[in-house]
Amino acid sequence: MRFDEVVPLVAGDEGARALSAVHARQIHRDPWPNFAAFDKEAYGETLRRQAADLWRRRSQMEYASVAQFTRISAELADHLVPLPWHGVFARIITDEVRHAEICAQLARALHPDAVADATYTLPPWPWPKRPPGDSWEEVAVWAAHALLVSSCLGEALSVPSYEALVVVSTDRIVTETLLQIRKDEPLHATFGWEIVQALVRAVPAVRPSLQASLGNYLRGFEASMGDGIPLSEIAGRSIEIAAAGPNLGTLTSEQTAFLYYATLESELLPRLHELGLDGTQALLATAQFAPQ
């Protein structure tokens, strides 16, 4: 699917315009940033293109979140889970649609040429495939894996990243975009922890299954957010995250890695412990060289 097919520049016929109007009323809940007011002349072409490419990739990841939460919600609906779960899923999906669009709109404002040929594809999910059959136990285990990765870990890790991006951004339109996304992420993470906790309590098979895969999940986030920087290069250091020159919503690899390791230690490992999961042991079990 092409980038402009997901977020059309201009609605076409009357039916498309009506659909776009309903979409806008639902999705543009907060004052929408005035992307037309972005001052291209204030920033160099290279800086804008690099930032546009990053925001385009963020839009693609948010679109993937729409797909994954829709799929999880549909599977759980077949098993008549409580209505509050569906209410929060509906809110999360709506938020992710808004995130995908607002990132796409900003990418286009920063540098239209950088997104002209962009397409959307769905990545392979890192959790196991949904098993066939109607066993609630199997569905509960599958949903717990999916929510642990997508919501508990993924959304929780995005919170400090967006907080840092707000700090370093030097452009009003970019900051407004970041703030709209930033305010939703804590809800998404909290919901995930609560649902996984409920599944752990209700289905005995959930906890050991999660523990067996936890190390691989954490290593996956380390690879993507640690950007190849090992903990040994971060430990014992402090890194300043502050505006330093023109910034259109980007962090350095070192800043991203620092935020990942800090969030892992201060939030993720304690929350995993509350679920009865040992994150430290999971990491040691997947290390290349286990301690003697």
Image (cartoon, rainbow, N blue to C red):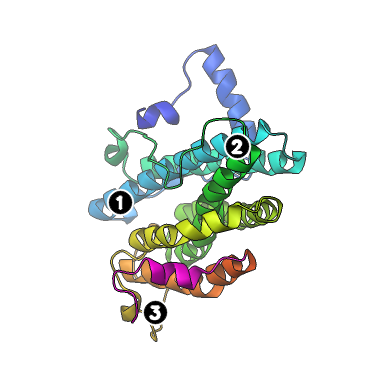
Locate residue 50 relative to residue 29 in the image: left or right: left
Q: Which residue is mark 3?
A: 239
Vertical order, 99 against 8 (above or below): below
Vertical order, 4 against 232 (above or below): above
Q: Which residue is mark 2?
A: 27
Q: Gap between marks 3 and 2, in whole Å?
A: 36 Å
Q: Residue at x 43, y 57 (%)?
A: 217
Horizontal and vertical percent for residue 260?
A: 43, 68
Q: Gap between marks 2 and 1, in whole Å?
A: 26 Å
Element class at badge 1: helix
Horizontal and vertical percent for residue 28?
A: 60, 39
In this view, the residue in front, 282 or 266, is 282
Horizontal and vertical percent for residue 27?
A: 60, 37
Q: Residue at x 57, y 38 (%)?
A: 72
- Which disc, if any, is residue 48? 1
Quadrant holding the C terminus: bottom left
Locate residue 136 relative to residue 162 in the image: left or right: right
**Where are the magenta residues, as a range?**
276-292
